[in-house]
Image: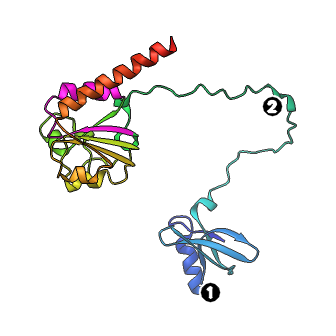
Amino acid sequence: LLPDSRTGGGELGRRLGAALGERPATRVWQVKDGQCIGRAGAGQQDLQRTVPRLILAAAECAEPVSETRHEALPVELSTSVARSLPRIEDLGSVAVDPATIAMAEAEFIVSGGNGVKDWDLYHKATAALGATEGASRVAVDDGFMPRNRQVGATGTWVTARVYVAVGISGAIQHLQGIGACDKVVAINMDPGCDMIKRADLSVIGDSSAILKALIEAVDNYRSGGQRDAA
């Protein structure tokens, strides 16, 4: 039994095997019931064979024995400990800033494209909706949105439950990036663009007018809910 390492006996074990005419079991990490298991294929596979006379143990199995001593003692657990543990309390949903959510993990994304003419209004609408912001490559290249917000095959592949494309025509790279999204809503002036064809729900019209209507609808819903609660 020798360690299978460059400096610890691997070469010596192979020379001994050649002298004895014995094929050694190399990089062995387990010996049990007359069988031994060794690593192969750059450590990605295991080979099992009958235990030979010569075994070269894997490096981690041949660590030198230290002077540290250990002792195992039985421990009696008190049942009172389990009774004193506090119950898990569900505090409900925790508010999260949509801007801090990674694009690949966001469940609700509103992306802006070349059809967005009022970016301040776009940011206001995403904040009102509580959505994570995204963008097409054109919007990013034009400097309206940062590169880490680009959606598509050349940006980030997203898996949102709801994806709203505002003023995005639907280049093939962008459509590839939203292929795993559950529901897609398209807001566009062109009823024949590829994004409209991909969408589950399409709204044909000016993006600024539609975003303003969305903000107003959200404000009315929230103010109505507050009055009902009062």
> Farthest residue in the bottom direction?
21
Residue 29: x, y in percent?
63, 66
Whether residue 125 is in magenta: the answer is yes
Instruction: Out of 185 and 52, give the one closest to the viewer.
Output: 185
Which residue is pictured at 67% across the width and 74% down the height? 36
Q: CA distance from mark 2 to mark 1?
A: 61 Å
Residue position marked by numbered label 2 in the rendering: 82
User: What span is colored magenta in the figure?
Assistant: 108-129
Q: Quadrant of residue 108?
A: top left
Q: How many marks?
A: 2
Instruction: Out of 154 and 132, give the one closest to the viewer.
Output: 132
Instruction: Out of 162 and 75, give the one closest to the viewer.
Output: 162
Res. 221 mark: none
Q: Is residue 141 above or below residue 33?
A: above
Whether residue 114 is in magenta: the answer is yes
Q: Is residue 43 above or below residue 68?
A: below
Q: Answer with left or right where residue 144 lies relative to residue 65.
A: left
Q: Is residue 134 above or below residue 9?
A: above
Which residue is pictured at 16% across the width and 33% down the height? 144
Q: Amino acid at mark 2?
A: Ala
Mark 2 residue crowding within 10 angstroms, few (<14) / some (14–19) / many (20+): few
Q: Answer with left or right where residue 59 lies relative to residue 154.
A: right
Q: Amino acid at mark 1?
A: Leu
Residue 219: x, y in percent?
34, 20
Q: Is residue 153 visible?
A: no
Residue position marked by numbered label 1 in the rendering: 20
